[in-house]
Amino acid sequence: MHNSVAIAFRGIPPSSALERYIGEEARKLEAICDRIRSCQVLAESLRSEKRQGAQVSVRLVITLPGTEVVVNREHGDDVYMAVRDAFAAAGVQLRDHMRRGNREHRPRDSEPESGG
């Protein structure tokens, strides 16, 4: 990755273990796509008296030349699982992006010969 991973916590105490885990997951994305320019990660607590369900949210913004991949994942109370799920979803999107990009940049073959 050309730039480091930017990690922010909102309502979750900063953790060097969680930062390391996020860094490891970000490095896995580099194996999928070597054109990643930056990766921003926001891990936040959604705790509220009115809120039901998910209590932890992870948002990824991965910048590539000419586009961004944005992923949001929520989990009940395990920020590590939310991070895992967010990076897994980002990996799927990056693979799709790379496939589309390779298809668009591939030279077109001449018309197929008709067998006769």
Image: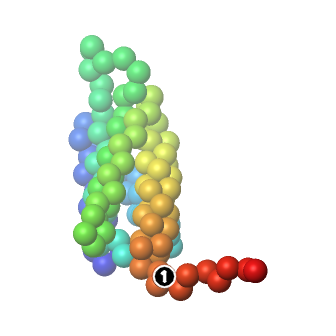
Identify the image quadrant of residue 43.
top left
Is residue 108 placed above or below 44 in the rendered structure? below
Q: At 45% across and 28% down in the image, what residue appears? A: 76
Closer to the camera in the image, 32 or 56 = 32
Image x and y of residue 87, in percent: 45, 54
How many callouts does the rendering have? 1
Question: Can residue 27 be seen here?
Answer: no
The residue pinned by badge 1 equals: 108
Q: Quadrant of the N terminus?
A: bottom left
Is residue 54 placed above or below 91 in the rendered structure? above
Image x and y of residue 71, in percent: 36, 48
Q: Quadrant of the C terminus?
A: bottom right
Image x and y of residue 8, in percent: 25, 51
The kind of secondary structure element at disc 1 is loop
Amino acid type, label 1: Arg
Q: At 42% across and 79% down in the image, what residue appears? A: 105
Image x and y of residue 4, in percent: 30, 71
Closer to the camera in the image, 53 or 103 = 103
Is residue 55 placed above or below 71 in the rendered structure? above
Closer to the camera in the image, 92 or 54 = 92
Dot 1 alpha-carbon crowd within 10 angstroms: few under 14, some 14 to 19, many 20 or more: few
